[in-house]
Amino acid sequence: MFKKFIENSRAKSPWIMHFDCGSCNGCDIEVLACLTPMYDIERFGIVNVGNPKHADVLLVTGTVNPRNAKVLRNIYDQMPDPKGVIAIGACGLSGGVFRECYNVLGGIDKVIPVDVYVPGCPAKPEAIIDGVVTALAKFEGLKG
Protein backbone atom coordinates (compact mmCIF):
# COMPACT_ATOMS: atom_id res chain seq x y z
CA MET A 1 0.00 0.00 0.00
CA PHE A 2 2.89 2.37 0.77
CA LYS A 3 4.31 1.88 -2.73
CA LYS A 4 0.93 2.79 -4.24
CA PHE A 5 0.84 5.92 -2.06
CA ILE A 6 4.25 7.02 -3.33
CA GLU A 7 3.18 6.51 -6.94
CA ASN A 8 -0.16 8.32 -6.50
CA SER A 9 0.70 10.88 -3.81
CA ARG A 10 -1.44 13.92 -3.20
CA ALA A 11 -0.54 17.23 -4.80
CA LYS A 12 -0.06 18.59 -1.26
CA SER A 13 2.30 16.83 1.11
CA PRO A 14 0.34 15.36 4.02
CA TRP A 15 1.08 17.01 7.35
CA ILE A 16 0.58 15.08 10.56
CA MET A 17 0.22 16.13 14.17
CA HIS A 18 0.79 13.85 17.13
CA PHE A 19 -1.11 14.19 20.42
CA ASP A 20 -0.46 12.03 23.49
CA CYS A 21 -3.61 11.80 25.60
CA GLY A 22 -1.73 10.13 28.43
CA SER A 23 0.23 6.97 27.91
CA CYS A 24 3.33 5.11 29.03
CA ASN A 25 5.10 6.77 26.06
CA GLY A 26 5.79 3.44 24.33
CA CYS A 27 3.65 4.38 21.32
CA ASP A 28 5.00 7.94 21.37
CA ILE A 29 8.54 6.61 20.99
CA GLU A 30 7.40 4.47 18.04
CA VAL A 31 5.73 7.50 16.41
CA LEU A 32 9.00 9.41 16.76
CA ALA A 33 10.86 6.42 15.32
CA CYS A 34 8.95 7.00 12.07
CA LEU A 35 10.85 10.29 11.74
CA THR A 36 14.31 8.78 12.28
CA PRO A 37 16.66 7.84 9.42
CA MET A 38 15.59 4.18 9.77
CA TYR A 39 12.07 4.95 8.42
CA ASP A 40 12.33 8.65 7.42
CA ILE A 41 8.74 9.33 6.39
CA GLU A 42 9.66 12.95 5.67
CA ARG A 43 11.36 11.86 2.44
CA PHE A 44 7.85 11.15 1.11
CA GLY A 45 6.59 14.60 2.02
CA ILE A 46 4.93 13.58 5.29
CA VAL A 47 5.75 16.38 7.73
CA ASN A 48 5.21 16.45 11.50
CA VAL A 49 3.70 19.80 12.52
CA GLY A 50 2.89 21.32 15.90
CA ASN A 51 -0.16 23.35 14.94
CA PRO A 52 -3.52 21.62 14.37
CA LYS A 53 -4.53 24.35 11.93
CA HIS A 54 -1.84 23.05 9.56
CA ALA A 55 -2.44 19.31 10.05
CA ASP A 56 -4.18 16.90 7.68
CA VAL A 57 -3.87 13.83 9.93
CA LEU A 58 -4.01 13.56 13.73
CA LEU A 59 -2.08 10.71 15.37
CA VAL A 60 -3.40 10.04 18.88
CA THR A 61 -1.82 7.80 21.52
CA GLY A 62 -2.82 7.00 25.08
CA THR A 63 -6.05 6.79 27.03
CA VAL A 64 -8.76 9.41 27.14
CA ASN A 65 -9.86 10.85 30.48
CA PRO A 66 -12.35 13.64 31.25
CA ARG A 67 -9.61 16.27 31.43
CA ASN A 68 -7.74 15.54 28.21
CA ALA A 69 -10.94 14.76 26.29
CA LYS A 70 -11.63 18.50 26.10
CA VAL A 71 -8.14 19.18 24.74
CA LEU A 72 -8.43 16.35 22.20
CA ARG A 73 -11.79 17.67 20.99
CA ASN A 74 -10.37 21.20 20.75
CA ILE A 75 -7.40 20.02 18.66
CA TYR A 76 -9.72 18.03 16.39
CA ASP A 77 -12.05 21.00 15.90
CA GLN A 78 -9.12 23.27 14.92
CA MET A 79 -8.01 20.97 12.10
CA PRO A 80 -9.21 21.95 8.62
CA ASP A 81 -11.46 19.60 6.64
CA PRO A 82 -10.88 17.04 5.27
CA LYS A 83 -8.99 15.48 8.16
CA GLY A 84 -7.99 12.01 9.21
CA VAL A 85 -7.63 10.59 12.72
CA ILE A 86 -5.49 7.60 13.65
CA ALA A 87 -5.82 5.91 17.05
CA ILE A 88 -2.50 4.26 17.90
CA GLY A 89 -1.83 1.46 20.36
CA ALA A 90 -4.03 -0.59 22.68
CA CYS A 91 -4.67 2.43 24.91
CA GLY A 92 -5.78 4.59 21.98
CA LEU A 93 -8.08 1.86 20.70
CA SER A 94 -9.80 0.80 23.92
CA GLY A 95 -8.06 2.22 26.97
CA GLY A 96 -5.68 -0.75 27.04
CA VAL A 97 -4.62 -2.06 30.42
CA PHE A 98 -6.02 1.11 32.00
CA ARG A 99 -9.58 0.70 30.63
CA GLU A 100 -11.00 -0.30 34.03
CA CYS A 101 -9.53 2.72 35.83
CA TYR A 102 -12.00 5.20 37.31
CA ASN A 103 -10.76 8.12 35.21
CA VAL A 104 -10.42 6.40 31.81
CA LEU A 105 -13.23 6.99 29.32
CA GLY A 106 -11.87 4.41 26.89
CA GLY A 107 -10.44 4.75 23.40
CA ILE A 108 -10.08 7.84 21.26
CA ASP A 109 -13.36 7.10 19.46
CA LYS A 110 -15.25 7.95 22.65
CA VAL A 111 -14.41 11.63 21.98
CA ILE A 112 -13.69 12.11 18.26
CA PRO A 113 -14.33 10.05 15.10
CA VAL A 114 -11.46 7.73 14.20
CA ASP A 115 -10.61 6.73 10.62
CA VAL A 116 -7.83 4.19 11.25
CA TYR A 117 -6.99 1.95 14.22
CA VAL A 118 -3.36 0.83 14.63
CA PRO A 119 -3.16 -1.95 17.25
CA GLY A 120 -0.15 -2.92 19.31
CA CYS A 121 1.45 -2.35 22.68
CA PRO A 122 3.40 -0.52 21.50
CA ALA A 123 2.43 -0.22 17.86
CA LYS A 124 5.31 -0.86 15.46
CA PRO A 125 6.57 2.01 13.27
CA GLU A 126 5.72 0.02 10.14
CA ALA A 127 2.11 -0.31 11.34
CA ILE A 128 1.94 3.41 12.15
CA ILE A 129 3.21 4.33 8.68
CA ASP A 130 0.70 1.94 7.11
CA GLY A 131 -2.02 3.61 9.22
CA VAL A 132 -1.02 7.03 7.90
CA VAL A 133 -1.11 5.76 4.33
CA THR A 134 -4.54 4.20 4.96
CA ALA A 135 -5.83 7.49 6.40
CA LEU A 136 -4.48 9.39 3.39
CA ALA A 137 -6.55 7.15 1.11
CA LYS A 138 -9.50 9.14 2.45
CA PHE A 139 -8.16 12.15 0.54
CA GLU A 140 -7.66 10.37 -2.79
CA GLY A 141 -11.25 10.87 -3.91
CA LEU A 142 -11.05 14.58 -3.04
CA LYS A 143 -8.38 15.49 -5.58
CA GLY A 144 -9.66 17.93 -8.07
Image (cartoon, rainbow, N blue to C red):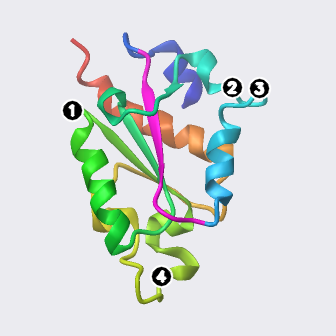
User: Residue 141's x, y, as percent?
Assistant: 26, 25
Query: Disc 3 designates what residue?
Result: 37
Query: Disc 2 designates what residue?
Result: 40
Q: Secondary structure at mark 4?
A: loop
Q: Residue 100: which numbered mark, if any?
A: none
Direction from residue 18 to residue 2 in the image, left or right:
right
Cα separation, mark 4 vs mark 3, equals 34 Å
**What is the quadrant of residue 113 in the picture?**
bottom left
Q: Dot 4 surroundings within 10 Å: few (below 14), some, or many (20 or more)?
A: some
Q: Secondary structure at mark 2?
A: loop
Query: Disc 1 designates what residue?
Result: 81
Determine contact: label 4, label 3, CB under 8 Å: no
Q: Which residues are magenta?
A: 13-23
The amino acid type found where label 2 is placed reads Asp
Q: Residue at x 39, y 75 (%)?
A: 106
Looking at the picture, tell me which residue is in the foreground, 27 or 102. 102
Determine contact: label 2, label 3, CB under 8 Å: yes
Q: For residue 63: magenta?
A: no
